[in-house]
Amino acid sequence: MIGRALAGMVLALCLTGGATAQPVIEASESFGDPQAAAVMLVRATTDIDLFDEVLDGFVTANPDIRIDYEQWGSNDLFKQSQQDCLSGRFSADMVISSAVDQQVKLVNDGCARPYRSAQTASLPDEFQWRSELFGITREPAVMVYNRELVPEAEAPRTRFDLVDLLRPEDSRFAGMVATYDIEESGLGYLFAFVDAQQATSFGSLAEAFAQSGAVSTCCSTEIIDGVASGRYLLAYNVLGSYALAQAERSPNLAIVVPQDYALILSRGALIPRRARNPAAAGRFLDYLLSPAGRAIMARSHLYVDVTDGDASGLDVPAANDSILRPIPLSPVLLVGLDKEKRAHFLSFWRDTFAGATSSD
Amino acid sequence: MALGFALIFALGGVAVAIAAFTYARSAARQSFDRLLLGAASQIATSVSLQHDGVSVDLPVSAFELLALAPEDRVIYAVYGAEGNLITGYRQLRPPVDGRQFFSGTFAGEPIRVVRLERPLTEPGYIGNVQVLVGQTLQARTELATQITRDALIVVALVAAVMAALAVLAVRSALAPINRIETAFSRRTAQDLTPIDVAVPQEVSNLVDTLNRFMSRLNRQVEVMQNLIADASHQLRTPIAALRAQAELAADERDPEALRRIAARIRARSVNLGNLTDQLLNHALIIHRADAVPLERLDLRVVAIAAVEEIDHSIFGTRAQPGLDLPEDPVHCDGDRLSLVEAIKNLAGNALRHGVEPVVISVSSQAGRARIGVRDAGSGIPEEIWSEAGTRYARSSGVSAEKAGLGLAIVNAVAVAHRGVLEFRHAKPSGFEAAIVLPLTGRGSR
C-alpha cells in the first residue's frame, strides 16, 4: 500500500445547507506516491471512509498518478465549482457529487469537458449525459427500520404499506418516522422532487407524513443512527449506501428497497473544463467504471446490485428491473434547481408539514 | 458515352446532395423549433399571479420535451412585464426586434432560442410575460446529417438502378443499328438494292435515308453503265464506217475520188462529234437530275438562254429560232442547265430536220408549265411517239444523225423534273415537242 497521509479532517457529520461563509473542505487526503509524475485533484461529496479503497486501488494500478482528494459538502462544492467555472479558474481535475442535479447544471452551463472511451460508451443513456457527466455509483433510496421494534411482518414493503401504517389515528408509528428535511438536505430535496415526478403516491405519502407527525430532519447519518437507537421506528428515503454501511455495525437495522419502485442514485463525476490533468482524470474515470473499480465500490456499498438481495444485504423479496427508477442524468433535473420551482415545491412541503417540525 | 453518363450522374448527384442537405436542414430546424415552441408554451402556461407577484411553476414535462434532444444543453428565462427576470438564466435576453426564433450563444456554443409572449391579465397586473427557451444545436445537426445520409443512400441506389437500366436501354436501342451493320457487311459490292431490316420507328428514318442514298448511287451506276453501253452501241458503227472510208482512201489513186472520200470522212467525223456530245450531255444531265437540287426558275429565261446558246456554226446560215413567250413569268422548280440543254436539243432537231419557222414557246395552263419547240414540218411519225424518248430507237429509223439520242436526253430531263416529254401536231400545221412540268405557285417556296 502506497503511503496515505491523513492531511486533515474537519468533522462535519451533518452538512447544513446555505454555506454562506467560506467554502469548507470537510476533509482531505493524498493517495499514491507523493513524488508521482502526475497529480490530480478530486473534489467529491463522498466520505473518504467510503471512497478510500477505490482510490487506493487506482493509485496502485497507476503508480504514476497521485490523487489529492478533498471531501466537500454538496452545496459548497457546487458553488465553488460554479464560481471557478465562471471566472475561468482551475477548480479540480474531477468533481464527484451525489447532488446530481447540481452536476447536471454544471454540465448544462458549459463547465465540463467531454471524455469518451470504451468504458463511457458502455454506460446506459440514463447514467451519462453529453459524455461530460457520468454516473459512477448505484445507490438505492431505501426504507430503514429497527428490527427489534418492528416485526418483519409489520414492516412496510411499499410506499402504500407505509401510508397504511401511518393512517390510523392511534398508529404507533406516529411521530416515529423520519425522513430528510428537504430544505436542509440537497439529497433529500432531490429524492422528494424525483418522487413527486414518479408516482401519484407522493401526495398521499406527504399527507400521511404530515398527519402522523413524521419527523423531517437532516442528514443520513443522524437519521440512520436514530433508527438504530430506537428514537425512530422507521426512516424513509435514506441513501442505501450509508444504511448498508451502518447496518454492518448495527445488526438491528433492516433495510427495505421499496417494491413499488426504487429510486437509484448514481453519483455524477465530471471533468471540469479547466482541469489541469484531464488525461489522468479520464484514466481515473475509466477505472471507476471498470469491473475492478465497481467491485471495490460494491464492497463499500456504493455500487449496489438491487436485484440481488444476497449480495447486497437488502430486503428485496421480489425485486426486478422494472421497479428500478434510475435518476436520469438529464436536463430535466434542472427544473428542481429553478429558484421559482424550488420555492413552489418547498412551500408545498412546508404547508404539508405545517406543525410537524424537526425534533431537534 | 460511359464518360457522359458518369458526368450526368456526378452532376445530378451533387445537385441532389445539395438539395437533400438543404431540405434536411430545414426539416430538422422545423421539428426542433416545434419542440422549443412546445416547451416554451408549457412554461408560459405555468406562469401565474401569486400574492407576491408573478410566479412560474416550471413544468417538468417542458424539460422532458426538451430532453428529446438528449445531448443538448438548455437555457431558459422568464421575464415579467417590466422586463424583470422572474426566473432562469439572466444572460438570455429577449431580442430587440421581437422575432420569435433567433440564434445566440450559450457558454461558447451556438443555440437557437424561441420567444413566446403570454398576456397576463389579472386584477392589479396587466402585461405580457416573455418566455425564452433555447437549446444547443447538436440534435438538429445530427438529424440533418442523418436525413441527408439516408436520402443520399436512396439516391445512390436509385442512380445505380437507373444506370443499369440506361445501359440496357441504350443496348436495346442500338440493337437495330447492329442489325443494319450486319445486313450491310453481308452484302456484295454490287448489291445496291434497298435493305430490308426490321427496325423500330426511331431508326426507320435512318434506314429510309440509307435506302434513298443507295438508290441514287444505283441510278448513277446505271448512268455510267448506260453511257458505256450507249457509247459502244452508238459509236462503233460510225467509227467502223470511218475506218472503211479511210481504208478506201488508202487504196485510191484518183485525186478526185480521194477528195470525195475526204469530204465523206469529214461529214462522218462531224456526226461522230455530235453524237459524242450528246452522249456526254445525256450522262451529265442524268447525273445532274440526281445530284443537283431543283431551284425556282422562270421558263421564259430558259427559252431565251437556249436561243442564245444554240451553236450557229452547226446549222450554218439557217435562221435563228423565234420566241413565243407570255407576258407573265412561268415558274417551276428545275435545273436551269439541264432544261436549257434539253430545249437546245429539241431546237437543234427542229433546225436540222424540220421545216422553218422554228419557234420556242412557253405557256402555262391548269397547273402545268409547258416549254416546247415547234416547226412547220411533219415531225416524228405519230406511231413512234411512245418510244421516241427511249434510248435505242434505231430500229424505227431514228438514228443519231436524226433525233435519236437527243430525244432520250430530253426525256430524261423531263422525268428528272417530275414532268413528261409530249409530242403533238401544231395547229394549223406543223409539229411540236414540249416538256410539261408541274407549275410552281406564284409566291410559293
Image: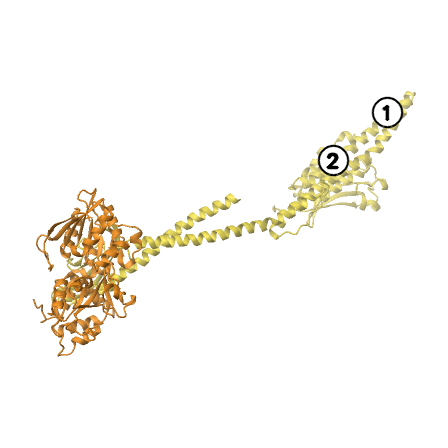
Does B27 sit left or right of B295 as displayed?
left
Q: Is residue B325 visible?
A: no
Q: Chain of mark 2?
A: B
The residue at the far front in this view is: A1
Q: Quadrant of residue A44?
A: bottom left
Q: Chain of mark 1?
A: B
- State the residue position of label 2: B281
State the separation of the CA atoms marked 1 and 2: 28 Å
Kindly indicate which chain is depicted in orange in the rendered structure.
A
Mark 2 falls on what kind of element?
Answer: helix
Residue B2 position, x and y percent, is: 52, 44
Residue at (18, 74) in percent of width and height: A151
Is B117 rendered above or below residue B373? Answer: below
Name the amino acid, label 1.
Answer: Ala
Residue at (35, 53) in percent of width and height: B144
Residue A199 position, x and y percent, is: 23, 69
Crowding at dot 2, Cα within 10 Å, few <14 / some 14-19 / many 20+, comes out as some
Q: Quadrant of residue A344?
A: bottom left
Kindly indicate which chain is depicted in yellow in the rendered structure.
B
- State the residue position of label 1: B262
